[in-house]
Amino acid sequence: MALSIMIVDDDVVCRSMLQDIIDECGIGEVMGTAEGGIEGARMILKSKPDVVLIDLLMPDQDGIETITQLKNSGYDGKFIMISQIENKDMVGQAYKKGIEFFIHKPINRVEVEHVLSKVNEQWKYERYVSEIKQSLAKLDIAGPSSPRKERKVRDVVKTILMDLGIIGEIGSKDIIALMENAIEHREATSFPPLKELYESVAHTYKQGQKDIEKESKAIEQRIRRTIMAALNNMASIGLTDYSNPKFEYYAPLYFDFQDIRMRMKVMDEELQPDKGKVNIKKFLQVFYMEILEKLNS
């Protein structure tokens, strides 16, 4: 099943080029095009495409404003921003509003195909995860795991940690404990709030409310640093061999592509590294779903 795509851009040449590229590469199907944000929002809410390619600057209503309106109206598809703007503040604002990727103007066929390919991978995985959730919910798997199952959870977690190159990181112990706790106390396939998980794991380490609060924060920081180490490992692999199976599988699955791309740029150009950021919630949710998949395969 191909991606359904909507193009919103006031430049008729840009719309035509994007449609031709999409039609020729076969990744998706263009459901329609709009030359402004207002018209685009109306068409998107009516047809609900999987992906929206939207220009940042348009005369009637800019891309960020249009995205905000669509999200407030309940649209939950993916957004790809089209822009020649290099202003970091505007780019940062776009990411905060839910942009998945950027396509830079002037339009480059290779970049468009690459970005659409990555979005398609995410879309397929999310559909797959959704199907797993539905299947597991029907099996009514709620309830505590047996000791044998817990040991198996630990084995699955360790395998993934080794693939990500972080089995030796101090936070790997916290991730193992967190995943065992989440699986043991799962309700259907819902992933518990992070704060609740940190506190549950902290209770196994410490006694006393003050100690629990302090340890919960320490667990979060250790996990954050460990996930950042995994991000660096993936970026390093990607720079060496972009077609490496581990990079192709784990990088788009566990991380936001813009974070991987930025980390690769920092490494490649030997820039001064910043503290960096990682989406902890996404990382742990994907980890959790992969464990469930492996336990029931």
Image (spheres, grey):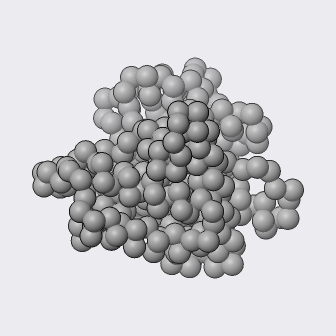
Labels in figure, total: 0
Q: Position of residue 280 (x, y in %)?
A: 55, 48
Residue 35 visible in the shown view: no
Comparing 114 with 140, the one in front is 140
Q: Position of residue 126 (x, y in %)?
A: 36, 53
> Which of the pair 248/25 is nearer the observer?
248
Q: In the displayed structure, would residue 147 be above or below residue 44?
A: below
Displayed quadrant of residue 111: bottom right
- Residue positioned 44% across, 27% down in the render: 70
Query: As displayed, is residue 182 above or below residue 293?
Result: above
When asked about the image quadrant of residue 196, the answer is top left
Image location of residue 26, percent across then percent down: 39, 63
Residue 23 point in image, percent of width and height: 41, 58
Placement of the N terminus among the 4 image quadrants: bottom left
Q: Residue at x 57, y 71 (%)?
A: 167
Q: Nearer the viewer, residue 145 or 156?
A: 145
Q: Residue at x 38, y 31 (%)?
A: 75
